[in-house]
Image (tube, grey):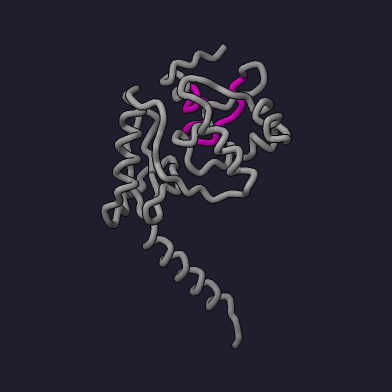
Amino acid sequence: MLWTADLKRMLANLDTARYGRLMALRYVDSPVGRLALQANDALLTGLRWASPGERSRDRAPSAVLDEAARQLERYFAGKLKRFDLPLAAHGTDFQKRVWAMMRAIPYGETATYGGMAMALGSGPRAVGMACGRNPIPIIVPCHRVLGSGGKEGGFSGGQGLPTKRRLLALEGVVLL
């Protein structure tokens, strides 16, 4: 069988369309912008900042998205200190270890890239890269990870560092 570029593109589009039908999507307005929650079956797979003008493609009710929206609302109201949601983040084994370590950082507290790296037997840059690839920010609190000496480090969500500062301030963390 002859594979042409058009045929390959058509098959790729079929896979994308099929995947899109399986994923549930829900938008939540928050103090740090409009968030898009993604789930596959009963597991939360992603949280991202929605693009301006992005329209809702909510297809069917999703209990996990309803619960995630409820918990986010409580978090932003200062009434929730720890998320309790079934997560399915896609990543490497190392990234998953970093994300699990981030989930263990208590509300209102911080860790450093270097400290996490020492605990994992890795380097701070690798931890920073894993933080930047976190597919479920806020719920997996990468905003709680700082550079050495309490420096902000980076943040890939929302408006970057202003969003990180806002999330930390919400939790009562004062940056020097």
Q: Position of residue 47 (x, y in %)?
A: 43, 42
The answer to whether residue 44 is above or below residue 70 is: below
The residue furthest top is 176
Residue 150, quarter of picture: top right
Quadrant assignment for the C terminus: top right
Quadrant of res 77: top left
| Region rendered in magenta | 151-165
Counting from the top left corner in percent of width and height, residue 52 is at 38, 42
| Outermost residue, left side | 61
What residue is shown at x 64% (from left), y 44% (from top)? 94
The residue at the point 68 percent across, 30 percent down is: 119
Q: Is residue 53 left or right of residue 116?
A: left
Question: Any magenta on residue 154?
Answer: yes
Q: In the displayed structure, does residue 105 sit left or right of residue 71?
A: right
For image coordinates 60% across by 37% down, the residue present is: 98
Whether 99 is among the magenta residues is: no
Q: Position of residue 3 (x, y in %)?
A: 60, 81
Q: What quarter of the picture does the N terminus occupy?
A: bottom right
Q: Position of residue 6 (x, y in %)?
A: 53, 76
Q: Is residue 81 above or below residue 3?
A: above
* As drawn, 153 above or below 156: above
How many numbered circles are shown? 0
Residue sitting nearer the eye, 128 or 41: 41
- Is the magenta region chiefly helix, strand or loop? loop
Q: Residue at x 47, y 20 (%)?
A: 108
